[in-house]
Image (cartoon, helix red, strand yellow):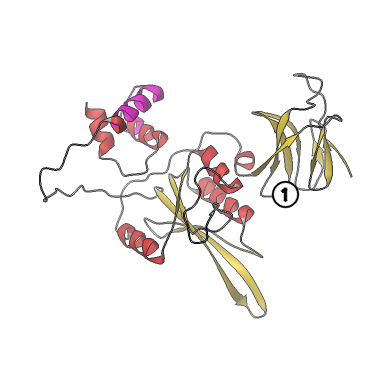
Amino acid sequence: MALTEEYRRRPEGWSAKHFYAWYRRDGGRRSYTWVKSRRQDAERVPKAKARGVHRKRRNRSPWPGLKIHQDGSTHEWVPGQKWDLIVTMDNATNKHYSMFFVAEEGTASSLQGVREVIESRDLFSIFYSDRGSHYGYTPEAGGKVDKQNLTPFGRALQRLGIGMIAAYSPETRGRSERMFRTHQEGSAFVGWIGGPLDDILAERFERTVGDDNGVSFEGVKLQIPADRHRCHYVKAKVNVLHRIDGSLAIFHGPRKLADDDPDGQWRSPELKAVA
């Protein structure tokens, strides 16, 4: 069918959301579920065998927003001061969407870079980086990244539906940059319509609620207040969110049980910290 043939001509790495956004902009009226089902059918159709050594080249023009690259550089940017410069850029245009200094590169700085891209542009498709330990776990030195055992950063991007690619050699990045160094038309960015980025681009730590209806996190006891859903959460599995700005929140599944702000003041529902 025409839709599946059109899908096969799209750039590699497009998610269902990216393809549906294009479909709607092109005048499509079907539902997201219907289009996603047709896309999955297209992926299951086997490719025809090559008829000979000569192949017709498939023309693909990767768009801005298809692949976002992030890197950090340690340097004495001012005399006597060494900082890490975190740059998050578009591999298609080399445009820098986010750039800032931090004392040390890590999960929080990488999440901040991703957030600034989404806030200034929109949701992108693929995140490309080196094999820094906060990006992905590498069981063996110099080996492949474990795609099943995700880091907090990896889980945050998974919640957004963003794919991750790890570079395995300097040549890989060089080839990628040369491939994308062309004039581009269109855009692969997709409008973000999900929940608060503060809670999505955050580190999550699973905890089991104790008999006192509280959890421990970094030496502090976080007391969960009773709510209208249940009087206590003893023995329940919850997630403590550590946001980029340092604030905390507690979730039970999709429900937020408690929250605070960057100044350490608890917001409603009231949450008390006991040393």
User: What secondary structure predominates along the stretch shown in magenta?
Assistant: helix
- Label 1 crowding class (10 Å Cα cut-off): few <14, some 14-19, many 20+? some
On screen, 147 above or below 141?
above
On screen, 140 above or below 213?
below
Q: Nearer the viewer, residue 204 or 137?
A: 137
Give the residue drawn at x 22%, y 26%.
1
Could you say whether the residue bearing mark 1 is in a helix, strand or loop? loop
Where does the magenta region start and end? 24-42
Give the residue drawn at x 26%, y 48%.
60
Give the residue drawn at x 33%, y 57%.
180
Percent position of residue 89, x then y: 46, 57
Percent position of residue 213, x then y: 83, 29
In the image, taking residue 83 as reference, residue 190 lies left or right, namely: left
Residue 271 in the magenta stretch? The answer is no
Residue 38 in the magenta stretch? The answer is yes
Percent position of residue 270, x then y: 82, 32
Kind of residue at badge 1: Gly
Percent position of residue 245, x then y: 69, 50
Q: Which picture quadrant has residue 223?
A: top right
Q: Residue furthest right?
A: 275
Q: Residue furthest bottom?
A: 79
On screen, 233 above or below 195?
above
Is the C terminus in the top left, top right, bottom left or bottom right quadrant? Answer: top right
Circle count: 1
Which residue is disc 1 drawn over?
246
Q: Nearer the viewer, residue 102 or 157?
A: 157
